[in-house]
Image: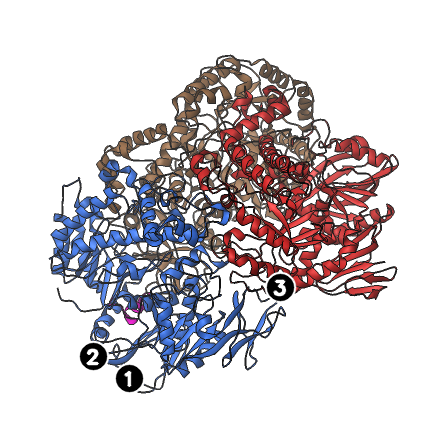
Chain colours: A red, B blue, C brown
Amino acid sequence: MNMKTPFLGTAYYPEDWDESQVPYDISMMKKAGITCARIGEFAWRAMEPRPGVYDFGWLHRVVDALHEAGIGVVMGTPTATPPVWFWRAHPEAAMLGANGVRNIHGGRRHFCSNNPDYVRASRVIVEKLGQEFGSDPAVIGWQIDNEIYHNGDASCVCADCVRRFHDRLRREYGSVEEVNRRWDLNLFSQAYEDIDEIPAPVNAWHNPHIQYEWQCAHEEADVEFITMQADILRKYTTAPIGTDMMPLLGLDYEAMNQKLDVVQFNHYDPEGNLDHPVFWFDMLRTVKDRPFWNTETAPQWPGSTAAAWAMPGEGFCRVNSWLPVALGGEANMYWLWRQHWAGHELLHGHVLSPEGRPAHVFGEIQQTAADFDKASRFLSGTRPQPEIAMHFTSKSWKLFQQQPVFNGHSYEGDVRHVNTVLHRLGTDPDVIGARHSLDGYKVVISPELFSLEDGGLSARIRAFVENGGTWVAGPLTDVRNGIGAHYTDRAMGMIEDMTGVRLDYSICNDNRHLKAAFADGTPAGLWTWVECYTLPEGAEALVTVTEGHSALVGKAIAARIPVGKGQVILCGMMADEPVMRKLLAPVLDAAGVRRYDTTGALTVVPRAGEAGEGLVLVEIAGKAASIGLDAPMTDILTGDVVSGRLDVEPYEVRVLKK
Amino acid sequence: MNMKTPFLGTAYYPEDWDESQVPYDISMMKKAGITCARIGEFAWRAMEPRPGVYDFGWLHRVVDALHEAGIGVVMGTPTATPPVWFWRAHPEAAMLGANGVRNIHGGRRHFCSNNPDYVRASRVIVEKLGQEFGSDPAVIGWQIDNEIYHNGDASCVCADCVRRFHDRLRREYGSVEEVNRRWDLNLFSQAYEDIDEIPAPVNAWHNPHIQYEWQCAHEEADVEFITMQADILRKYTTAPIGTDMMPLLGLDYEAMNQKLDVVQFNHYDPEGNLDHPVFWFDMLRTVKDRPFWNTETAPQWPGSTAAAWAMPGEGFCRVNSWLPVALGGEANMYWLWRQHWAGHELLHGHVLSPEGRPAHVFGEIQQTAADFDKASRFLSGTRPQPEIAMHFTSKSWKLFQQQPVFNGHSYEGDVRHVNTVLHRLGTDPDVIGARHSLDGYKVVISPELFSLEDGGLSARIRAFVENGGTWVAGPLTDVRNGIGAHYTDRAMGMIEDMTGVRLDYSICNDNRHLKAAFADGTPAGLWTWVECYTLPEGAEALVTVTEGHSALVGKAIAARIPVGKGQVILCGMMADEPVMRKLLAPVLDAAGVRRYDTTGALTVVPRAGEAGEGLVLVEIAGKAASIGLDAPMTDILTGDVVSGRLDVEPYEVRVLKK
Amino acid sequence: MNMKTPFLGTAYYPEDWDESQVPYDISMMKKAGITCARIGEFAWRAMEPRPGVYDFGWLHRVVDALHEAGIGVVMGTPTATPPVWFWRAHPEAAMLGANGVRNIHGGRRHFCSNNPDYVRASRVIVEKLGQEFGSDPAVIGWQIDNEIYHNGDASCVCADCVRRFHDRLRREYGSVEEVNRRWDLNLFSQAYEDIDEIPAPVNAWHNPHIQYEWQCAHEEADVEFITMQADILRKYTTAPIGTDMMPLLGLDYEAMNQKLDVVQFNHYDPEGNLDHPVFWFDMLRTVKDRPFWNTETAPQWPGSTAAAWAMPGEGFCRVNSWLPVALGGEANMYWLWRQHWAGHELLHGHVLSPEGRPAHVFGEIQQTAADFDKASRFLSGTRPQPEIAMHFTSKSWKLFQQQPVFNGHSYEGDVRHVNTVLHRLGTDPDVIGARHSLDGYKVVISPELFSLEDGGLSARIRAFVENGGTWVAGPLTDVRNGIGAHYTDRAMGMIEDMTGVRLDYSICNDNRHLKAAFADGTPAGLWTWVECYTLPEGAEALVTVTEGHSALVGKAIAARIPVGKGQVILCGMMADEPVMRKLLAPVLDAAGVRRYDTTGALTVVPRAGEAGEGLVLVEIAGKAASIGLDAPMTDILTGDVVSGRLDVEPYEVRVLKK
């Protein structure tokens, strides 16, 4: 099935409906402009009603009908929802809580990925599904399981999980003595005598390192569980395989997608928060070469037993649908097609109501479909053209969960804030993980990159700078080793050696006592965490403490330090947008980063490729915005030729081609 | 014992005091004007100190002394508090939590009504108590157990509860296939193969239907437990039997009281919230033909280990005491007579302090007693005369617990709001359950009547309208079936068919984007949930969307639709009092409902009967109010003749007879 | 080792560092001016790596090096942190939660002080440690365990704890009948038949008396555990022994320190809250004759995985260090010397960072050290000279936990408020426990002294008053017996009899209805709890109800009643500082209490002794303050002679000698 991209898709649960509804549903999908349907993800029992007894007839009939209608199918493996016969045979495969209480049947994702019986049963159903649909021309992609992630404090503590944890510790540390040494288990007399006696870190006051490793061990299990399924499916299919993930709790997109083909992502962000998906999409496009799929978003609002938000303004649905494809993806899919008529999530926004009536956003969806079609050639023949990379690493994200550093700190929130500042400065940065190459970027920004002991980052950043790159680092960058411990002979792992800077003081600040200013005297209001440096010769202080404790006054908070052919901008602060703009704009300009002159909350995505060159503009705040164009361009959606100062209406999308 | 009503009563715990205190307590009761005492409810151990060994001597002496003093006795069965010998023999009869932890001895209502040993022991003590006091002339009524209700998430999950749950499922659904079908258990592959393997809905993400049925099964057990006791008592007594209930968690007053004689009710509402008991009393009087008893209210404030409120204004105690008898009850009883000197609830408001001193409200209580006496003939010879009925059903209340629809939604809060609006419009509606007849009402109002599949409501409402009645319905009315599922071929179960209206969109609204107005242009500010309709020919839009998403603009939110000889006022909105008044006043007037012209927070209760005709006026906000009278009336309490515009003082009570 | 006081000390964890770091650490301690180091408290495993195998070599080397540098050692017993070999052998020695889940290895203070195996292992390590260091000249003191306290609702419920609880009940009550009687267990039919069947008060709604006794039983276990260690150590050492405590949950400082030598105290109070440590230090100095040690405070801020506060203003560290020694202690010690490099509490404020860099407050610490040295002779040769005692008893503190009386009530908060008022009135009161003598005080103040049935208080207070003393009592004073029950024949246990006052009404007040005024008409705004009295002949009303419920108007709220040669100021109210000052100032003046005329938040500590007479002044709010001096004095720190009105700068410390 050869399909135009971007896909406009939706989640479809035919197993929950009488089969007689299928023709109506498909006819309405056509009317809406839907081009692909995600199905199957929770339908294990419909596929295997009794152990070893399979029924794929119903599913073939739906898939065939969709195919006939020209709608592609993304087939989900149903491993998140084992049938009751599995639970009856293996109740101990359900997740075990720290309080000794096990999950029971009902709901989903309640079984332990480390349980051998669950893994075995999952293998079998995935193999069968692969055999049935692997070569089906309707199937344009695969989704493995659904929203798998480490559960934080609610994660399973069963014996299999603990055993896997011990396996990881043996692999990563080699011996219990090394665990004791690296975790400083002399502290509180905690040292263990055997790796096998290290417990799951619950029911006591545990240190951040054991908590970190415990989370990593769980994540490894999840990655292995998903990869196991991909390996099976690949025997039967050439369609791209992925797993739909939620950006939660430090989840490692690089590790999870390493053996997969297409990054899949679910997001539910309300009006006013569209800078969130912008950030995530800037990240998702860097994980794999292939354009990612936004597999879930709410057409109206999410809702399980209660609607989660009030109705957004008109245009929100359209803009929300456009963002993934503007920023480098090739699909936007709604959750869900038709609201469940019974069971869970009866208040969730939908395209069709249970009785089959179109939602109030139906027109926005139709327009989106039409526009995707118009822009298809341009979008599929171009890619975003970022000149800046910004780090957001799974390791730092995880380490900050164990050590938030100060109350209310959010690593993702702060990095997203910098991302938003960069967008407001008229650029579209890549957001990259630890393992991503730095080649080709003019500027690399690493806000709060807690540890550089991750994917060779330390050496690679150093090389990037010495070869002429501009690196913006800090605050809270390079101040922990790979498991979240301090260094004992230096405050920063690599930066002090590379730059000659000395980090004197790390201050938890609430602005009662501390004031700082730029070199031109402009006050620089600061957020909570402030790092004060002594600079080496040749460094230029950008922001300096002007008032506060006498030990701090005069110390640099932000500085430019030439290193090799490049430079480091050390930035021991976070701040509101105007301050961050004043700090970063000159850095970008000096590095020759192309910037567009915009007003308002305009997301500007420069794109280029064999289909030409142009810009996608998306207004994400529901307010007026504008951009200065330096050459006339043609709007692919309207045919208009525009130039000079271009006003962009609230929630407007423009696709401009040179 | 032939007693004047209304009773002014109090809870009395002689078992907690030295018997020497009884004469003093009774003398002070006389001084206060107390005419009945509730005793015995927690005194199982004093009655049966060892299994099968009984001691009722102390209780006879107290009952006799009360009788001698002319104070009636409401005798409680002590089943909420089994003695330690029962716990020792049957620790597994205590409630079992979802986390596997059982309740232990201490406190009350901690045993499971489904446990056969607990039921058996309860039978025995009730039988004995009935034998002892069934024909005692002092006993003017019986109270079974105390404040029994389903515990929501804290309800017992023991094997007996699960067995009873399965029994209910078998009875209601017939087969596991039907359970699977009606609960849509294809969703998430949840379907069961045997009713006996369906677990208590804990320790997983469960659907609203299983949660609803689980709650119903628990409620059935409670009803059966109470009814079992009533059946026993009835062998020995002709005095009215009831059980004192709290309005919590969807409790079904109709079911619980079906086999009982007198509705008993406990409430603890603070200053500023007296519209709450007004609502409940409007409801309680409709459950049985016999006037209800307000069995508990705080003379000062409630308090367990801390006082729950600050001191209300002067007159609050009196008004709070008057409300139940004004609105159709025949008793008000204080909790408690004398503050416990040790043990639980040492901060609870009281009539006497532990050292026997009168509370600061003692004078208000005395005045109330005197006034009850003066008004006794009028009150006992008249009943309220409602012309409006408003639905408040246990089923909808339960279903909204599982599906609150939007955050912060309160079914009881919203229906109470409409009740308050109706009172401010100068009427006193009946609040009725699903099974209550609609005969004789001019207007029936069903705000948020989530499901009409309850007690034949759907057909009875239809008949009511077609025979000329006015039905005000909505929002959130008729949009779920009897177990909380959507309809799949229509948005509303019966209304669309009856009226020809089509419910197009249900919108979660926060007023950022949506505006609406009456036909005369008056803006109508809306609360969270808004339903937008397409109207049939002949319908009149009352409120319409004027701004917002283009799909919604012009849609009707409230409308009048003639049906048969009557009409339906479909009202897809809730709103503040002025908007609701503007919507409802013309409806009432058109239906010929008698309204009084009042200002302030005046509760007006028209009463009539063999003792004549009149009004009881109760000012409930502690602020000035007034009423326009159309004929001179005599105040029974003061002897004054009043007419025209009558000012009512803050917290004043007037009993006006024509 | 003969050392100058006050000590400036710090917590030092050499077991967590490579031994090569010791010389650097000690050299920096010398540079900072540190004169003593707390070590060993969590190093059980380093001392006893395997059961019965000891290694004290490393510890001797550190102690010897400190000694050589002239730094005293406070040696901690490591019983809070048993090694993993103990846990492996005795997992059931870990604390058991109410939900049936046991603590596991990791963290600290996770074993049960009632477990015989844990006690036995603790005895052995303490004995060994005593043998090793008991006569070491470097060791200037001992600290037993660390921050032991009853855990409230999280306390252990193991069988040993329950057995100990039963032991206490047998001892305190004699029989189960007496338990039933005194706890009023007729209520809710709770009475037990055997003390051994009384459960830990969890998993039910328990009464305050069982909760109180349960807490006392736990505290007894803690006291016994600490005393056991002191008895062992005393065989080997003459250095003072203590245990470092936190002021939590009603902890009984008198009981815990009875067999110990030196009161040790840990506090972490942020900027703006320095009235808290002032209060605690006023209390600590009264527990034992020997000056107390402030064993822990944060040099910057506390922090486990997140910094708990933002940076305080300059001078805070110095003032915070001075407060304990100004108010009667002889040591201030920082937690911690060098921030842990891994493990727990990686964000905690420190003197040295993990990489060995001085914190920004290093200069303040150096100045404090120099000033301690200058003032050493004066401080060690004088003691505070309080003329007022204020009660703050462990029993009342515990009882209020079970019965907070009203929401948001804080016993310690309210007593601390009165303490602050007294300081603002220019005095420095002693804060005393129930067992402390009243001899020599001009005024005794007992705010919210819930029960006088404690240490013979009732009789001793009466004698104090009758012999001419002034006693300020109330509110909430003498209104509960020794286990938190009401009296049944009087509202107050002793006061009504002594004074002839009658407590008519106790009112929970929110100022909506109640108003009060002084005799001169000045309005007296009141806090939540108000007691209204009828006064006897000869009493003088000080504050009276002027508006509110008619039963209350005219009642006295505060009054002066002559008793014997003395007087009682009965005070049924708490209020803001101005009202409390207006009430208390004349009382103090009439009793001849010496007051200093101050402005601002100045802590004035009059001191006298063989080293002369003088004042220590500490400004605790970081704002300007002043004091009126009646004679010229010399500032020991600066050499300045001052007199008349003396301005004190924000966070300034002055040590003035006559």
Q: Which one is nearer the viewer's eye here, C341 or A611?
A: A611
Start-end of magenta stretch? B317-330
Instruction: Say yes or no: labels 3 and 2 on the same chain.
Output: no
Q: Which structural element holds mark 1? A: strand
- Residue B610: assigned label: 2
Q: Marks 2 and 1: CB-CB under 8 Å?
A: no
Residue C167 drawn at (x, y percent): 30, 29
Residue B642 drawn at (x, y percent): 31, 84
Residue C100 appears in the figure: yes
Residue C601 drawn at (x, y percent): 58, 47
Q: Which one is nearer the viewer's eye here, C160 or B265?
A: B265
The tag earlier along the polypeptide, 2 or 1, is: 2
Q: Which one is nearer the viewer's eye here, C149 or C588?
A: C149
Left or right: residue A140 compared with residue A387: left
Instruction: Say yes or no: labels 1 and 3 on the same chain.
Output: no
Q: Which of label 1 and label 3 is nearer to you?
A: 3
- Classify mark 1: residues with Cα within 10 Å, few (<14), some (14-19) or many (20+): many
**Count of labels shown?**
3
Residue labelled with disc 1: B633
User: Three-letter amino acid code at disc 3?
Assistant: Phe
